[in-house]
Image: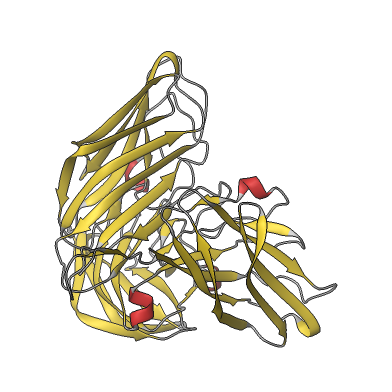
Amino acid sequence: MAERRCLKYFPYRGVGNPLSPRLSYFPRRTEEGLSQNTAVFMNTSGGAQWNAPYFQALNHGRGGQTVEAEAQQVIPCHGVIRNLYIELQVAPGVGATSQFTLRVNGVNTALLCTISGLNLTCNNTVNEVAVVPGDLACWQRTTTAGGPASGDVVCSSLFVADDKTRDFDMLMVASRSQMTAVARYLAIEGLEIDSGVEAGKISIIPFNGIIRTLYAALDVPPGVGETKTFMLRLNTVNTALTCQIAGLNTVGFDLVNEVAVNRGDFIDWLITGSAASALTKPKVSALYYPTLEEVIDTTKVHQRTPSEPANNTYLAINGRDTATVVEANHQMIVPDDGIIKNVAAHFGVAPGIGQWRRFTLRVNGVNTALILTIADVAFFGYETATEVPVNAGDLVCWLYTESAAPAGNPFPEISVMFLPD
């Protein structure tokens, strides 16, 4: 059959820069029943300082990290990482260079590229690096003296899974803060700070599926006689998908259990430590297998805001973005020709009788027909009838509007599907 490109799940939970971490999937079907399961990792530095080595996560960024363990994410399946593309907002400058290198388990690899002088881009489509479950990977950026003090960096690469038999998505998160022995929660995706409050870390499931193949890693072992336990939470209830890292070990996994999830469910990670377990920066990954064909043929783009948006403000379609009135700060680039459809949204607080909240998809600064309105006492809604065609290079974002006086502090979460040609 003719080649068909499919995108898969890529939630992004960044703050600030709308180009921040995106994770998308491009399985290529080359024959019936076979997909290539190719993931696109996208990341931004968030304006971190340049004139020092900095580390960035594969699929999320909240600024470059000076400590590598804060950016590393654990790989949940066998595959290769390749096709590195870098774009800068500020050139290194005459006589200066910026180099970007994939690091695996704390070691430089052959997947790197260098930007010099007044150039803004570089790529490496020749080298590829094999990774296995449990590997810790991140990007390292180094800049010679004379470069600008700061500047955003957008980084993307491809992950090609060895498993070609079944479509799946990666759920990857790392904590950049040191976790204590008490119970802490992590969002399902991104580069995060763990929290003792679960409500701030849950994400909504827009499609039925199964979550399995849990891998967890620590930068520091728990210690002799001590443990760290990782567990998937579903609707604030513990599930069977769990693993424990004990003693002087730093990696754990659960390859047996799986958890069914349905549209509208909430998920997050719970991490607990024994009383004297060491402070550590945990990383957790799992695989999500959608069970609906319409989901397999598309990608979910996910936005979860950390604050209440004001009327007539803009949000990135992917990430953890704070709404503002400047549309250009929230537009994201479409990576391929296709259509955008199937929008779903959830609010922590219903608008109230006679009140409403609305998301409108914008393409190249123009409103489209893809509009979702949630009104009265509803918390959740979706719209599956409208499709909006987009082209590679188009700029897309959400316009948020609301009625005169909806109930406050809603912390909206919105997902939409992208189906490439």
Viewer-side residue, 92 vs 411: 92
Viewer-side residue, 226 vs 7: 7
Placement of the N terminus among the 4 image quadrants: bottom left
**Residue depicted at x 71% and y 88%:** 377
**Residue depicted at x 70% and y 47%:** 326
The percent position of residue 240, horizontal first and vertical second, equals 28, 84
**Left or right of 418 on screen, residue 376:** right
Placement of the C terminus among the 4 image quadrants: bottom left
**Left or right of 327 on screen, residue 111:** left
The percent position of residue 390, horizontal first and vertical second, equals 50, 59
Residue 409 visible in the displayed image: yes
**Residue depicted at x 52% and y 70%:** 415
Q: Among all residues in the image, which is located at the extreme top?
A: 95
The percent position of residue 193, horizontal first and vertical second, equals 47, 56
Within the image, what quadrant is residue 6 found in?
Answer: bottom left
Within the image, what quadrant is residue 349 found in?
Answer: bottom right
| 48 is higher (above) or lower (below) than 238 | above
Residue 416 visible in the displayed image: no
The percent position of residue 250, horizontal first and vertical second, equals 21, 57
